Image (tube, rainbow, N blue to C red):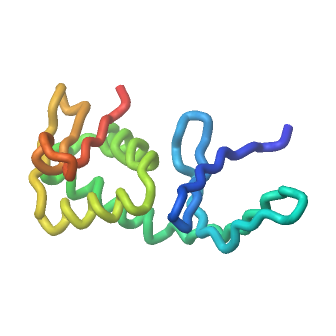
Amino acid sequence: MPRTETFTLYKKRKEALATTRIGHIEKEYDLITDEVDENGVRVIRMKPKVSTELAKLRNELADKIMEKLDETGKMFRKLLLDTLNDYGEASIRRMHRRVVLGIAPIKATKGCFEIIIGDGRKKSSDTIRIRE
């Protein structure tokens, strides 16, 4: 059985995301061209992004969040990294910058199932919902 991927293309953005059925972002792509020929066939050329830097940012973000919450559990770290796989590159970079530089406060709610970066009442805050 061939493996299928679900792609999400964004208007006015030059990137695409490939996700699994669960919703995890597996790969990110840069859009090279997006053209429609005279027969109405749409041809999209994409180039995979290198994800080693993004994985490093996710690990640093998870470590810093755990440090700020005084959390030391290995299972919590695994759940947090699993949840961070649902976020695209722009979101990870934004949260990383805010957490690592100490721009925004971090707090946990609902028995540590939600992590709020920022005020929580403002649009600029991020909420990470840990799967139960």
Q: Quadrant of the N terminus?
A: top right
Question: Residue 89: which quarter of the image?
Answer: bottom left
Q: Residue at x 34, y 43 (%)?
A: 80
Tell me if 51 is positioned left or right of 83 in this view: right
Residue that protrudes farthest toward the bottom in the picture? 32
Q: Residue at x 64, y 50 (%)?
A: 7
Tell me if 24 is positioned left or right of 29 in this view: left
Residue that protrudes farthest toward the right in the picture? 39
Tell me if 35 is positioned left or right of 88 in this view: right
Question: Residue 38: which quarter of the image?
Answer: bottom right
| Residue 63 position in % (x across, y down) | 26, 56
Q: Is residue 47 above or below residue 117?
A: below
Q: Quadrant of the C terminus?
A: top left
Question: Residue 46: which quarter of the image?
Answer: bottom right
Of the pair 10 and 4, the residue shown nearer to us: 10
Of the pair 93 and 7, the residue shown nearer to us: 7
| Residue 108 position in % (x across, y down) | 15, 37
- Inspect this view and state whether residue 127 appears: yes
Q: Residue at x 61, y 35 (%)?
A: 21
Q: Residue at x 15, y 32 (%)?
A: 109
Of the pair 74 and 98, the residue shown nearer to us: 98
| Residue 121 position in % (x across, y down) | 12, 40
| Residue 83 position in % (x across, y down) | 39, 42
- Inspect this view and state whether residue 69 appears: no
Residue that protrudes farthest toward the front in the picture? 38
